[in-house]
Amino acid sequence: MQSPPLADELLPVNGLSVDVEDWFQVGAFENVIARDSWDTLTDRIERNCAVILDLFAAADVKATFFTLGWVARRHPALLRRIADAGHEVASHGWDHERVFKGDAKSFGDDLRKAREAIEDACGVRVTGYRAPSFSIDQRTPWAYMVLAEQGYTYSSSVAPIAHDHYGWREAPRFAFKPLPWSELIEIPVTTAEFGNRRLAAGGGGFFRVLPYRFTHWAIRKVNTRDERPAVFYFHPWEIDAGQPRVTQAPLKSRLRHYTNIEKMEEKLRRLLGDFAWGRMDVLASREAYRAVAPIMARSAKDQAA
């Protein structure tokens, strides 16, 4: 006999997150927009985050804003507004440098610098982290050691897929303990399995480009069949059709960045109404008891030594 569908009120509360970076700070443009030019470019982060905060308020949802320290230093009032609205403010690093481009020392310095700027801006302790461009992977076993040493309680820095810019296909799909001797947990961004294929389904460009019904199907599948919360993310620039165009970027990068931006706000409004959403720190505390230490992580201490 087929089991009845799970009642909506019993579905998990999903993790809602915003990666707070401006249009000129994205990985797709890192080779055509120099970091030392950022201060000269049109800043649209205040405008876009205001729209997002209004969207969240209208839907009565709370979220986590993974924020660059670079942004926090320049927009302290924005971070205070986010925290005062009941959202979590967490770290996205200092200036969107991918983790695997450095080493344990440079990563630790980046974490400290970003955390200081964020906590000074909003007056709230930072306990969560998301690596720029999901850049914690099999090349960076030392990253979790540094996060644990600095007192972070969770990370959401892994995309367990194969992708040309990022990805750790062998990583678990759901919460895991990267260090068996630490309480730190990793909460990967959501993927869905279709046959023997693993598909990215946690937001960003995939949400903008693909039909809405795909994301709805994927989150519903994770909630019901896997009985786990989904993790969804997007960026402030993804709702900003008026942002400057980076014409010197490769065509592939421009297509990824600009496709369906004008439709994003309405798709988000629909998504917020179709599922239950909450902060990532709350999700982390609920998932901690189910997080396991995968075999692949057991050698991380030796590799980092």
Image: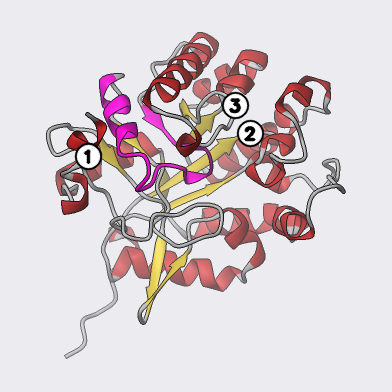
- The reply, left or right, for residue 56 in relation to residue 299 is right
| Amino acid bearing label 2 | Glu
Q: Earlier in the sequence, mark 1 or mark 2?
A: 2
Label annotation for residue 21: 2
> Pointer 3 and pointer 1: residues touching (CB < 8 Å)?
no
Q: From the top left corner, tell me how far across and down residue 181 is, in percent.
A: 12, 33
Observer-side mark, 3 or 1, equals: 1
| Amino acid residing under circle 1 | Ala
**In which quarter of the view is residue 205 placed?**
bottom right
Quadrant placement of the N terminus: bottom left
* Start-end of magenta stretch: 128-149
User: Taking 151 as reference, is 256 above or below it?
Assistant: below
> Quick one: 58 or 217, which is closer to the camera?
217
Upstream in sequence: badge 3 or badge 1:
3
| Residue picked out by circle 1 | 300
Alpha-carbon span between mark 3 and mark 1: 26 Å
> Is label 2 in contact with label 3 (beta carbons under 8 Å)?
no
Residue 80: horizontal and vertical position, in percent? Answer: 56, 17
In the rendered structure, does residue 165 fall within the stretch colored magenta? no
Q: Kindly tell me whether residue 6 is visible in this rendering.
A: yes
Vertical position of residue 168 compared to residue 103: above or below: below
> Is residue 132 highlighted in magenta?
yes
- The crowd level at tag 3 (other Cα within 10 Å; few <14, some 14-19, many 20+) is some
Q: Nearer the viewer, mark 1 or mark 2?
A: 1
Q: Alpha-carbon distance for marks 1 and 2?
A: 30 Å
Secondary element type, mark 2: loop
Q: Which residue is mark 3?
A: 95
Which circle, 2 or 3, is nearer the viewer?
3
Work out whether residue 63 can be spotted: no
Taking the spot 39% from the left edge, 20% from the top edge, the residue there is 105
- Colour pattern: secondary structure
x and y percentages locating residue 187 in the rendered image? 33, 46
